[in-house]
Image: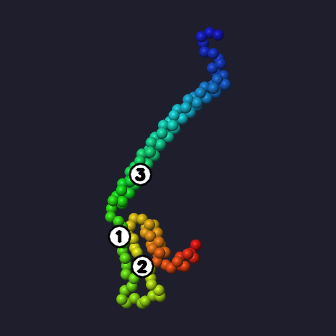
Amino acid sequence: MGCASSKLDELPAVALCRERCVFLDEAIHQRYALAEAHLAYVHSLRAVGASLHRFFDQDLTYSAAGPPSPVLNLPAKRKGDPEPSGSPPEILIFLCHEPELALQEAIRKDARDQPSGIGSSLG
């Protein structure tokens, strides 16, 4: 029992316990490193989101402040063209950034110009 180191330190169970303590310490440090990396990732996502928000707000403000999209009305027929059966619908070409809106407007205009029997049979 004296001051000399105990023989218990040399047992395999004690060595295994020490190795486990080292692994646990390393796991704790890695957990903190993961938490810091996750926090940095969340901050970067927030910064990207704010940048995208400003970008689209600026784009929407610019497009809303600009002049309306021009409409080009093409003539229904030219002098040398043969006469088609029935009257052709007026052709509208929208020059804008939102082609879906132009298409919807053209469909609505076409539906208004058609007799009620033709448009109602399309379901």
Q: Distance between the residues labelled 1 and 2?
A: 16 Å
Badge 3: few (under 14), some or many (20 or more) residues near its Cα, within 10 Å?
few
Q: Is residue 102 above or below residue 46?
A: below
Expressed as whole percent of the image width and height from the top left, the position of residue 50 reads 41, 47
Q: Disc 2 marks which amino acid? A: Glu
Q: Can residue 103 be seen in this view?
A: no
Who's the residue at 48% across and 37% down the image?
36
For label 3, the residue is 52
Whether residue 17 sits left or right of residue 28 in the image: it is right
| Quarter of the image where one finds residue 3 | top right
Q: Distance between the residues labelled 3 and 2?
A: 40 Å
Label located before the other in sequence (3 or 2): 3
Expressed as whole percent of the image width and height from the top left, the position of residue 28 reads 55, 32
**Secondary structure at numbered mark 1:** loop
Q: Disc 3 marks which amino acid? A: Leu
Q: Disc 1 marks which amino acid? A: Pro
For label 2, the residue is 90
Report the front residue among 120 and 122. 120
**Secondary structure at numbered mark 3:** helix
Report the front residue among 89 and 26. 89
